[in-house]
Image (cartoon, rainbow, N blue to C red):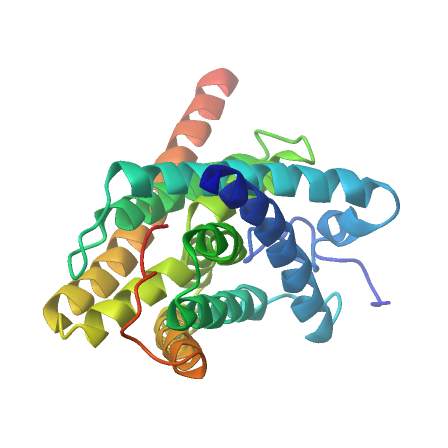
Amino acid sequence: MSTGEPPPRRVPIDPDVDLSVPAQRAETAGAARWGVLAVIAAGGALGASARYAASLAWPAAEGTFPWAVFAVNVTGCALIGVLMVLVAERSVVTHPLVRPFLGVGVLGGFTTFSTYAADVTELLERQRVLVAVAYASATAVAALGAVWAAAVATRALVDGDRRGRAG
Amino acid sequence: MNWLLVVLGGATGAPLRYLADRAVQARHGAGLPYVFPWGTFTVNAAGSLLLGVLTGAAVSAPAYALLGTGLCGALTTYSTFSYETLRLAETGRGFLAAANVLASLLVGLGAVFLGVELAGGFGSPGGSGG
């Protein structure tokens, strides 16, 4: 399709799948697709179950801050930061099914955007505007802070370890 | 029982997100560097719309476990969204990173609201839970 060589090792923007990465583009070609889809489904089942367990363990009373979903989303964002550094940025882990299983499946299934948006909408509907604004913004700030801190820490650990081995 | 339905929904939602993400990216130009994460943006909006419909329709607890907690929960994602935002910010696309956060939130809320209204409006239980 494209002329010329693809750029050497581009780190994708989208951790689920990025079609500009040839290996990811080829994931659904041929019979291998069933393996990829199966591990994504298995991971999604695991992640969604874990989120469901958290919501049962810490149920949020109506009109209050949804702590369980907050904790789930922030934790999942920290873990994707670790995972993507190991898999995509530093290639510490190279098995082709690790990203589909853990990233797309487990962490994608564990974290949720729809429940977050629905809970904010419901809090607004109940006139709990302060709680709604606090929840909406705290999730965004904590989740983005978590993915950033986790990625930075994991890069430092991996790079430090490699320098240690080299030196 | 509900647990099994969540498992089933999660096992469907995650592959659906992956395939939908691929389909959206393919439409936006095969092989081109993927700049704004339209795929994830689209699935998050679609999942929020569906969850709004389920909330507004006040579906039964098993249906909510299967389609809400399971399917919509796994179809949509916060982890993918946050890593994309981080990558955009770190690759000098701070404007796109901020736009992704704001647009995802506003469109997500709007989609839930629209879904609820389409299904008959608030005032029915079924809200949170996963």
Residue A161, visible in the rendered structure: yes
The quarter of the displayed image where residue B98 is located: bottom left
Where residue B8 appears, x then y in whole percent? 58, 44
Where residue B19 appears, x then y in whole percent? 68, 58
Q: Residue at x 57, y 29 (%)?
A: A92
Instruction: Say which of A120 and B53 sits in front.
Output: B53
Where residue B33 appears, x then y in whole percent? 65, 66
Q: Residue at x 21, y 74 (%)?
A: A124
Measured along the vertical axis of the image, is residue A69 above or below residue B118?
Answer: above
Instruction: Say which of A147 and A111 sits in front.
Output: A111
Q: Residue at x 49, y 55 (%)?
A: B63
The quarter of the displayed image where residue B48 is located: bottom left
Where residue B113 appears, x then y in whole percent? 36, 78
Q: Judge from the rendering whether residue A26 lies leftward or rightward of residue B47; answer left or right.
A: right
Measured along the vertical axis of the image, is residue A158 above or below residue B21?
Answer: above
Residue A89, visible in the rendered structure: no
Instruction: Say which of B91 and B121 sits in front.
Output: B121
Q: How many marks?
A: 0
Measured along the vertical axis of the image, is residue B68 above or below residue A97?
Answer: below
Instruction: Say which of B9 and A29 sits in front.
Output: B9
Q: Judge from the rendering whether residue A103 lies leftward or rightward of residue B113; answer left or right.
A: right
Measured along the vertical axis of the image, is residue B98 above or below residue B1?
Answer: below
